Amino acid sequence: MNEFEAIRAFFDWPTTHTELGVGDDAALCAVPDGQLLAISSDMLVAGRHFFADVDPESLGHKALAVNLSDMAAMGATPRQFTLALALPTMDTDWLTRFAKGLRRTASTFQCDLVGGDTTAGPLNISITIMGEVAKGQALKRSGAKVGDDLYVTGALGAARLGLWYRTQRLRHALPQASAAAAIQAMDWPVPRVALGLALRGVASAAMDLSDGLAGDVRHMAKASQCHAEVHLSDVPVAPCVLQAQGINPALFATQGGDDYELLFAASPEQRDCIQTISTTLAIPITRIGTMRAAVAGADVSFVSPDGRDISDALQGFDHFASDPVQQASAP
Amino acid sequence: MNEFEAIRAFFDWPTTHTELGVGDDAALCAVPDGQLLAISSDMLVAGRHFFADVDPESLGHKALAVNLSDMAAMGATPRQFTLALALPTMDTDWLTRFAKGLRRTASTFQCDLVGGDTTAGPLNISITIMGEVAKGQALKRSGAKVGDDLYVTGALGAARLGLWYRTQRLRHALPQASAAAAIQAMDWPVPRVALGLALRGVASAAMDLSDGLAGDVRHMAKASQCHAEVHLSDVPVAPCVLQAQGINPALFATQGGDDYELLFAASPEQRDCIQTISTTLAIPITRIGTMRAAVAGADVSFVSPDGRDISDALQGFDHFASDPVQQASAP
């Protein structure tokens, strides 16, 4: 099977809202008047973002889910994506399963696969996603105001626990149900697309948590020229993380990557509305802090239950970090 | 330097026609009413599409140029691109030069870098490009009609000769000027963007030549449900290929990849118009054959000067091919 046959066999799916899909030099899509195009790219590298022997079906899902999460974070409706794929060998069994996971998630979120590239090379999955958001409605990182509440969706730390479990970094045994939940969170993240759409006109700023709350909240604070004050005891921690022994659950959860929950800011006037959204979508939304006036040299304070600022001990994930703790948190 | 600092240092350039560029969860772009969005992705892998020790400046250029070539092939105006980059190490000297080459070409073609991803991993460059083309004006592969002329721009085979020269596959010495021209063609391809725009309303079908004329013309014939008849003696061969000893220039040129010239079909009524475009843009355009009625089991005939059909001996480049000749034609 050559690359053209592979594309036809595995990735030439019917599109539902695209003028021209896979097979030409470029795809063609319409963007309705009054809408902006939202664009984001994520690259997943074997041995770095996933284990080379991971279930290909979950990998197909996750590669798209992390991009869908970026659409959610902008309040955009996902529309199309391209897939550039480097494969060590033309393994049709692997491709069948990868395509199955990818296609199901694409179908769930009505996101058309419109093109891409397939080549030989070290396993690498690069997806670019496109969505639509009405002009003036996008949820930027930069829109938070002093006095805004800070929220996160869902609960944090489960995917990081899955990674630690799989790499045998945990010093204590994990209950079986917790291990399963952690692995599930790591391999099958759920992008908060409906929630992102619901937050348009409600949130003043939003982003998704991919590198850990501790680092990501700094990005929002900096972009919004505010100082984020986060109460560590209010950070929602995934139940499986609470079950783990030998770690500090709240500290562990704020430093994990791969959560794909949303972090957002909103005026206190929106509290009732946010409660309604949480109830309607059955997604927990937790207020974790407040946007304060900018402070020179510090974008964020993480306040511990005893009132101390422990921000210096917390960092997000950096793919090039040389600190061994950070390195170890990548596969 | 971490990944966020690297993005700021090397890839956070001012945009000229983009609502929101690098730095948020997604970029935001407007697509004018009446225009379709054209989208294409290309992934370049070290050791496969380029040598790992290639001049990073030319690599930055080429990574974007091959995507610009896809816009040219659709008759689309390039507007934005995203860059996903996997790097073995955070080599700031390499990044400086890569970004320099990329930025100059982006600026030349007024194509805004709007986002992407930077991660550690085996060297891999994945670019997704977006452009605009008025509804109904895109140059698809599928539009060729029986009786249309077939054309190629420029001359073919130089980039392939550069590859053979660099990998020491040539059995005879190449004149120094020819070697320089071949390497130039391989490392610094010129996307035919202005020509693609000029062909809107003139060409019935178009595509760019990235995998070699022999294979690419099959794709157009198949998409257009025609049979392409190509006269081998009419195929324009790059002067440096004509200088090379020990190869058949025309056969060599039709099987080379990386030409990034345009292949297009047009009604014979357009001959004068095409001549004018060629003169105006100072780009040679050569008529190489004709679209015939579809023939079962054969998408293309390559007719040799003595009238024989030598199609079976010709193939385009396939990244997964196991034929050693094909494999050897990749770096």
Image: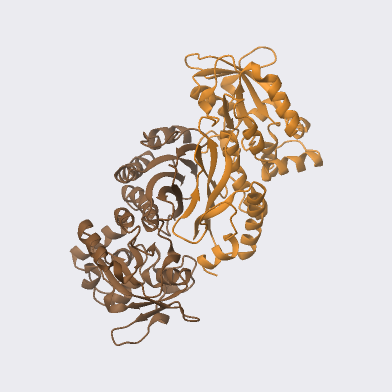
Chain colours: A orange, B brown
Q: Residue at x 34, y 67 (%)?
A: B266
Relative horizontal placement of residue A123, taking residue B266 as reference (left or right): right
| On screen, residue A81 above or below A306 | below
Location of residue B285 (image quadrant): bottom left
Q: Residue at x 60, y 17 (%)?
A: A148
Give coordinates of residue B295: x percent, y percent. 47, 81
Which percent across, then down, holds residue A132?
54, 40
- B142 and B49: which is toward the camera: B142
The answer to whether residue A39 is above or below residue B181 is: above
Residue lying at the far front in this picture: please name it.
B269
Query: B231 or A88, which lies in front?
Result: B231
Location of residue B162 (image quadrant): bottom left
Residue A48, visible in the rendered structure? no
Residue B319 spot, x, y in % from top left: 47, 65
Which quarter of the image is occupied by the C terminus of chain B? Answer: bottom left
Quadrant where the N terminus of chain B lies?
Answer: top left
Residue drawn where x is 51% and y is 25% of the image:
A142
Q: Is residue B181 left or right of residue A151?
A: left
Q: A33 or B104: nearer the eye?
A: A33
Expressed as whole percent of the image width and height from the top left, the position of residue A265 reads 60, 23
Q: Quadrant of residue B230?
A: bottom left
